[in-house]
Image (spheres, grey):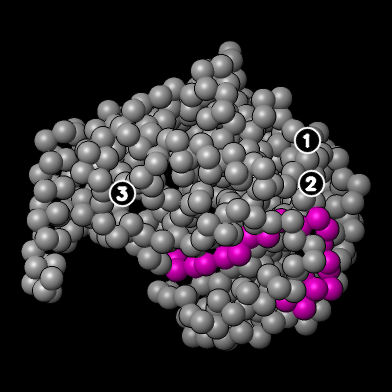
Amino acid sequence: MTDATNTTNTTNTVGTAARGLAARVRGAVHAPGSPGHERAGTGVQLLNPHRPAAVVEAAGADDVRAAVAWAAGHGLPVAVQATGHGRGTGLADGVLVATHRMDGVRVDPARRTARIGAGATWRRVIGAAAPHGLAPLSGSAPSVGAVGYTLGGGVGLLARRYGFAADHVRSVDLVTADGTARTVTADTDPELFWALRGGGGDLGIVTAMEVDLFPVERLYGGGLLFDLGGDPARVLGAWWDWTRDLPEEMTSGVSLIAYPDLPGLPPHLRGRHLARVAVSWSGPVDAGPRLVEPLRSAGPLLEDTTEVLPYTRSEEVFADPDEPAAFRGEGLLLDDLPVEDAAAAAVRAAEAPFMSVMSLRHLGGALSRPPRVPGAVGHRGATAALTLLTLDGSRDTPAMADLRASTTRALADRTLGRSLTLSFGEMDPGLVRTAFSPADHARLVGLRGRLDPRGLVHSHRPLR
């Protein structure tokens, strides 16, 4: 087959996809080259954007069902994207369903639940729940899509008190690879309900879910910023020792940020290695300062932003950036934190000629207990999670990949497996396998094979 023939076939596929879908959906359909196609294919993650034959900007669940059914009928792959935070390998052909317009949130204060549309961010859920004195199990960055976060487990600001976000899903509306719309609960389909709650996004396209809300109006939280001064073990060790006997109402983490000495960065950050300890206390707020006090002597303290916050300001606890970037990250679940090994990895990161962030989360508490209704979240025995993030304006270099790989090797003896929601970038099937026990992974793969025997659903967390 000649190059000219290949080009003609590709053009025909694109034209067929755009025309065929436009006749079946209410939302806009975007062909390659249009602004809508480019915008929908990128999102927050700038690396490996989707390059589909068509983008369906779904106006509702019927559009999702129609798009999936059309793609299945033509043997084309289909993927979904709300915000693009977790994208790994982009879709190179087929149909991308963009769900950002499906961002409705409906709160039932009597039942303490929220029904969340596929494109809703945690910010929208937080805002809808707050007038009722309620809060969701949202993550550290409210700009993240609530559904994708929850499908992978979800470790948020209230995690040690209430557990994984996936543990508190009541129902899921799902379109499977054959275009069938299902409402999945523990009663209607216990096997699929188990798999959706922590198994990732490889089993279909979720159009909505109902989740529990919790009576949390305020937090004592914020950050303590330290200058590491070449000794990250001091702050890491003090934080890890502090976590040993904490009440479950305290969820915390620490980020070690290596700022390269490059133009464009604020002068007070250039070339410095800093640590920011984030604390989220959901118990009686007057007890928060006393519990946090021992941390203030962990190192040279540059800034203290801890205060009583309404949950609507919960994004200030971890202060995660919102702007689009090109980033990759390895997310490891550890049975204990080897402070010296982690500190040595942080020093290597600080010496690299690019920006990196090593983030650690304290786990345990309710995260370690099985939920009332079983779910697929793996490695509940982990006591810490570590993510090494490398980022640049537009690329992921071999040096960045080598740094992430060397950190993974250094912590291998304490690593139970990967975290689906704290890993950023491409996860091949072998890495996804490590997120679960062998029996649970086999169970997930078997279910996926029954639901999608042709492998049409494209996911960055593939079950194979």
Query: Which residue is denoted by mark 1 in the rendering?
Result: 369
Q: Is residue 171 above or below residue 293?
A: above
Q: Closer to the camera: disc 3 or disc 1?
A: 3
The residue wearing badge 2 is: 381
Q: Amino acid at mark 1?
A: Arg
Magenta span of residues: 325-345
- Seen in the picture, residue 29 relative to 274 is either above or below; the reply is above
Is the residue under label 2 in contact with that under label 1 (CB below 8 Å)? no
Residue 151 appears anywhere in the view: no
Secondary structure of the residue carrying tag 3 is loop
Look at mark 3 in the image and give the residue it sits on: 77
The residue positioned 33% from the left and 57% from the top of the image is 91
Residue sitting nearer the eye, 1 or 31: 1
> From the viewer's perspective, is 252 left or right of 164?
right
Q: Are marks 3 and 1 in contact (CB under 8 Å)?
A: no
Residue 202 drawn at (x, y percent): 46, 44
Residue neighbourhood size for the residue with mark 2, other residues' Cα within 10 Å, grouped as few (<14), some (14–19), many (≥20): some
Q: Nearer the N terminus, badge 2 or badge 3? A: 3
Q: Position of residue 374 (x, y in %)?
A: 67, 29
Residue type at the position of mark 2: Gly
Residue located at (41% from left, 30% from top)? 174
